[in-house]
Image (tube, rainbow, N blue to C red):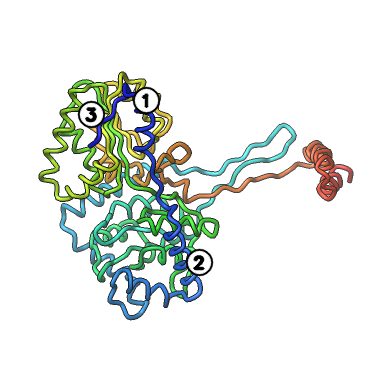
Amino acid sequence: MRRLSTQEQSFKQNFADLLAFETVSDPELLKTVDQIIADVRQQGDAQVLKLTQQFDRHPAHHFSELELTQVQLKTAFDGLTVEVRQALELAATRIREFHQAQKQEGWTYVDALGNTLGQKITALDRVGIYVPGGLASYPSSVLMNAIPAHVAGVAEIIMVVPAPDGELNALVLAAAYLAGVSRVFTIGGAQAVAALAYGTETVPAVDKITGPGNRFVAAAKRAVFGQVGIDMIAGPSEILVYAEGKNNATWLAMDLLSQAEHDTVAQAIFITPDESLLNAVAEAIEQHLLSLPKAGIARTSIANRGALVLVKNRQEAIDLINQVAPEHLQLCLDDATEMAEHIRHAGAIFMGRYTPEAIGDYCAGPNHVLPTSGTARFSSPLGVYDFQKRSSLIMCSQHGVKTLAKTADILAQQENLDAHARSARYRYQD
């Protein structure tokens, strides 16, 4: 795991190189994805089935075999052990409670001229949620995508999840049942995104697609944006841990490895002004890699994209954190809430020594679908607001229109839009 210090002359360039990463710029990838989307638009179910058989080695002979029934979802839920079912239910309850607080209602007010102005907030009609399958099976992703949609009032939630070799993850299906998913299709990749965006004979077209996936999924989401809404172009998982003062090096090491084990291109960065703590964390990482089941993935991740960064003081760390705009940020120090006040860019901030990022992944309550690759500079976590849209409300009074229409008439003339001007003028002249 590389070591960097802000005292090094080449630090700025080295740090910039560490952060450089592009998820979906490969021309061959984009060409392949565009062709998949075009084929699905033309051939519908037949092409989705063909690609599912090809890429996922799914044994289905007919498209109908790719859709699961509510009975299958309930059976998966009922088959959970009591311990697992209770954990899933607790997570769902906490996620629902948090997102209920995000729900917004419409509003209006009457201005000094007697005009009524405001906003109407409505839920999307139908959304699609993409859930990773196979080796990466995440029931938590089902809860984090479906529950906010339900809270927002979305009428129909369509879930797609790949099932390599036809194998289904019972916990993912159980989560879909618990979260109230309307329909589930065992399809994945760019073909699933295309089916959701444009619809097929069986898969209904949706208004928005949310949820993480591989680079084919990310590229496909970018390609269909405009036909449908999307939550974000998700890159590899990231964590940045800042620590000072008395800390447990093993805790910090495991926090870093918790993201490194996701993917060989995931990123784990540790920043501290304490060189002895930096050394202790480095040693703890090596020790735990010896017993971690996904050590190969984690080791590649930290070797390629990880870093241990020594800073002079907290302010240097704050500047670096805001430069990174990390997906997950842990502040492991006594006055974490005070330091958090200075953080402008981060997907989620975990404050204090007793708040590991892993809790946020499952059951804290806030959403774990977060902006990556520096997009926290302008993006937010997935939330209820992603499943709602706003319409402006404008109703002029007979008195109020005279002032506003005259103003509109003048400005429209300045823009050489005569029909606009007359439309307004007739309202106050007549």
Would residue 109 appear left or right of 13 to someone viewing this image? right
Q: Nearer the viewer, mark 2 or mark 1?
A: 1
Sequence order check: which comes first, mark 2 or mark 1?
2
How far is mark 1 from mark 3, CA to CA?
18 Å
Residue drawn where x is 34% and y is 37% of the image: 18
Mark 3 surroundings: few (<14), some (14-19) or many (≥20) residues within 10 A: some
> Tag 1's secondary structure?
helix
Residue drawn where x is 46% and y is 41% of the image: 379
Please identify the residue farthest to the front as the structure is shown.
Answer: 9
Q: Quadrant of residue 247?
A: top left
Please identify the residue farthest to the right as the structure is shown.
Answer: 429
Q: Nearer the viewer, mark 1 or mark 3?
A: 1
Please identify the residue farthest to the top as the structure is shown.
Answer: 313
Which residue is labeled 3 in the image? 353
Picture layout, residue 281 above or below residue 116: above
Amino acid at the residue labelled 3: Arg
Per the rendering, the mark at residue 198 is: 2
Q: Quadrant of residue 248?
A: top left
Which residue is labeled 1 in the image? 318
Q: Nearer the viewer, residue 81 or 129?
A: 129
Cβ atoms at labels 1 and 3 below 8 Å apart: no
Amino acid at the residue labelled 2: Tyr
Residue drawn where x is 22% and y is 20% of the image: 245
Mark 1 surroundings: few (<14), some (14-19) or many (≥20) residues within 10 A: some
Would residue 402 appear left or right of 47 to someone viewing this image? right
Sequence order check: which comes first, mark 2 or mark 3?
2
Q: Percent x, y for residue 51? A: 37, 72
Picture layout, residue 423 above or below residue 16: below
Amino acid at the residue labelled 1: Ile
The quarter of the picture where the N terminus appears is top left
How far is mark 2 from mark 1, CA to CA?
44 Å
Sequence order check: which comes first, mark 1 or mark 3?
1
